[in-house]
Amino acid sequence: MTKKQNLELIEELSNAYGVSGFEHNVSAIVQKYAKRYATVSRDSMCNTFIKPEAADNRPTMMLDAHLDEVGFMIQAIKPNGTASFVTVGGWVPANVTAERVRIKNQEGQWIPGIVATKPPHYMTAAERKQPVEIANLVIDFGTISAAETIDLLKVNTGCPVVPDVTWEYNEKLDIMMGKAFDNRIGTAVVLTAIERLTQKKEKLGVNVVGALAAQEEVGCRGAKVTVRKVKPDIAICLDGCPADDTFTPDWLIQTGMKRGPMLRDMDTTFIATPAFQSLAVATAEENNIPYTRAVRTGGGVNASELLLYEGVPTICIGIPVRYEHTHHTIVSYEDFENTVDLVVAIVEKLNVSIISEF
């Protein structure tokens, strides 16, 4: 696809509402784009599979990304019409306040709301100093009673909630701002890479399958299912990974915007397959693709579940995302493009002989 088409794809994915467990809108976008060059299917969990035409006797390469985004869920409606809520995925409570959200009501409509706290005018000195807690926040719909919220807006316990943010592109900086780049940017990489690879399918030594998993943000649940359905011989996890370049000394930056894809050596749940990681590094250098390597002391991605499936060789390639797990995130287009180039170049190298040596 052209750059304009890639930007349109990323915009559509970023703007889609799809908190963990409610990824249907995102899956529909994947199906719309991928059906032109592959068979696309979805299971009842909303895991979505992209299967181009396969050749006999080739190993299966699984390209993984997750569809879901962090968000919230309505817990209960208070007598005054506001709602208590819980987090879905990892949030810092202070990043949640005074933000717009959308709530999917019981009729499937997306209702606007605002995350609210007590105004500072009514806070005591002690209250102003207290750390923000989700339990002390509410979502305000502009109603004045529980009856209005429940009967008129059709919002009640169990309704999913997502950040209300619209994607935008800054042409001068070649960067994108929006919500849910964790992991809609990884989803876009999988779609774009597979489309390019299908144009070279006769020359490939592997069959490529895209597996877009649900519910990563609540424990990599979808990947537990996708990897057992695909049964890969080798796997790459593509994820939007938190950039550290705005608060870390230059010598320690391991996931920096406009520094290329991040090759993750380790996090709390996963250690990359060493020989496969070395091949990825060599491929980046041979193709003059900028990259960083990361040894993380926190976090976890679907790669852990892929590796645990019969020990298949697995690496994680991250696209740097500033301010993950907030309403507003930033991604560089060149990092997206370099990641696609690296994935395609790696896949082109693989065959049964090389994989057997891992």
Image (tube, rainbow, N blue to C red):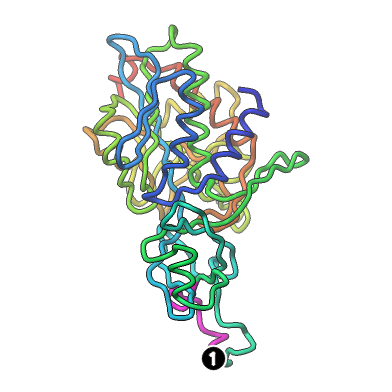
Q: Residue at x 42, y 19 (%)?
A: 38
Viewer-side residue, 270 vs 59: 59
Q: How many marks?
A: 1
Residue nearer the viewer, 175 or 281: 175
Q: Is residue 293 above or below residue 52?
A: below
Residue 149 locus on image (x, y percent): 47, 69
Work out whether residue 6 can be spotted: yes
Q: Residues within 10 Å of mark 1 (few under 14, many from 20)?
A: few
Can the viewer see residue 275?
no
Image location of residue 138, percent across then percent down:
49, 73
Toward the left, the furthest residue is 310
Q: Is residue 132 magenta?
A: yes
Residue 97 location (% of width, % of height): 56, 70
Rendering quarter of residue 142 = bottom right
Q: Is residue 16 left or right of residue 229?
A: right
The image quadrant that residue 204 belongs to is top left
Three-letter code, disc 1 = Ala
Which of the image's four quarters has the C terminus?
Answer: top left
Q: Secondary structure at mark 1?
A: helix
Which stretch is magenta? 126-138
Instruction: Residue 253 in the image: state x and y as whole percent.
Output: 57, 49
Residue 26 on the magenta segment: no
Quadrant of the image for the N terminus?
Answer: top right
Residue ID for mark 1? 126
- 54 versus 160 height, above or below: above
Which one is in front, 30 or 60?
Answer: 30
Residue found at the very far right of the displayed protein: 172
Q: Residue at x 54, y 69 (%)?
A: 141
